[in-house]
Amino acid sequence: MTEEKAKMSAGRKLVIFLIFVLVLLTMAAYFVGVNYFTKHFLPGSQVNGFNCSYMTAKETEALLAQKAESYALAVETYGNGQEGITAQQVGLTYSPDGSVERVIKQQDRFKWFLAFGQKRTYELASSTSYDTSKLYEAVKKLKCMQNGTPPSDAYIADNGSTFEIVAEKTGTQLDEDKVQEIIAHAMVTSRPSVNLEEENCYKKPKIYRDDEALIRQCEQANRLTDVIITYDFADRTERVDRSVIKDFLVIKDGECTLDREKVAAYVYELAYKYDTFGNTRTFQTYDGRDITITGGDYGWVINQEKETEGLISAIKNGETQVREPIYAYEGWSRTSNDIGYTYIEIDLVNQRMVFYKDGYPLVDTPVVTGNPNIPGMDTPTGCFALDAMQSPAVLTGEDYETNVTFWMPFCGNVGIHDASWRTQFGGSIYLWEGSHGCVNTPYDKVQIIYENVDVGCPVVVY
């Protein structure tokens, strides 16, 4: 037993010795590695794209200098195109500046044993230089830099029946400054290639089809144009539908809305076409003559400011409707013949007045009007609206005060009234015993007119 114990003890000592020797060898190997990688690159080290594992600074610099002379950069372009720029084109040179040695010193050499199977990449641009003007020219001469198609933004288009979003286009136009920057950096770091598409060098649209604001504006444009407003002018109509409203649209503060000035311009054209206040008119007299009437205060006038607001409100509210404009002044008939078929006609030359009601001559009578040869005593001509009706009334002037039973003014203090002091009417009386401008009418005739008209009735004087 003693001999066996001795043998076991000897074996244990041998194992311990071997372990000790192994530890010493391991430590020796470790420190040898630490010392080695103090001046060499760790395994898996790449400098400017070249494998520099186990190389010293000088060996690495020699490699980089050699590679710089024969370097060529592959420039990958849109659509799998490829071009190249060589070191000679740009005057590329490598000049050691101590950067390689600094990188080696900064390595974690105490963990060198963990470096196997790992990869370390270093880009040292400071030691590589190029001729700036040559690089600039080389880049500008690349085919991809010539005649590129600029990108286009997504936009809203009218297809005739609705608005839709037309998708953006990427184009093939490059951002020259960015291309210069990317290629310059690639060359000084000896990258084998650059992909201009992946580097986002192509100019991009600013607005894409999925842009929230664009989608909202398109929806707003379609909503605003989905309405029909018909203006009713009795025998004529004006239709405000999509074809008209689309010209009112404007993008303001990121929203598609109605341009008030454009709507106002439309209402102005509407007024220009349909307003009749003070217009020159062709009028057919009681005896079949066609004459031209100018002046007066009868007719229609659209209140353009209020109607502009009314039209905008109707469109925004989506109110399909038949609409009458908001008027500042109104006549009796909204047809092309705005005088209509109930009116008073006064012929100054023939001293005759005819009152038509619904096209029927209810009164046809001689009258006495003002003397046109005496200043301030003539009866004004034109188309007027009956301003008021009063019975009885007192007519006053500078040198007179007269009581009448029926008074219907149509132009200031000039109007139609009975003249009980006269026994004769018509003829040439007005030239030697005319009125102060009023239309003196037989009592029974003016009574019929008074009982069958209303304020606003057209009065045509010629």
Image (cartoon, rainbow, N blue to C red):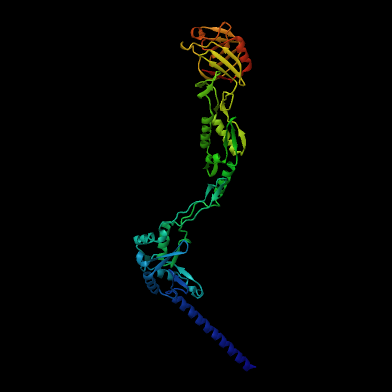
Q: Tell me, yes or no, if residue 391 can be seen here.
A: no
Above or below: residue 165 compared with residue 92: above
Q: Tell me, yes or no, if residue 169 can be seen here.
A: yes
Camera-side residue: 115 or 150? 150
Q: Is residue 200 left or right of residue 355?
A: left
Camera-side residue: 417 or 285? 285
Above or below: residue 34 compared with residue 362: below
Q: Is residue 228 left or right of residue 37?
A: right
- Which x, y percent locates residue 397? 52, 9
Above or below: residue 27 compared with residue 399: below
The image quadrant that residue 407 belongs to is top right
Rendered residue at 55%/33% (across/down): 308
- Which x, y percent locates residue 187? 40, 65
The image quadrant that residue 6 belongs to is bottom right
- Which x, y percent locates residue 27? 50, 79
Camera-side residue: 438 or 248? 438
Above or below: residue 50 compared with residue 393: below
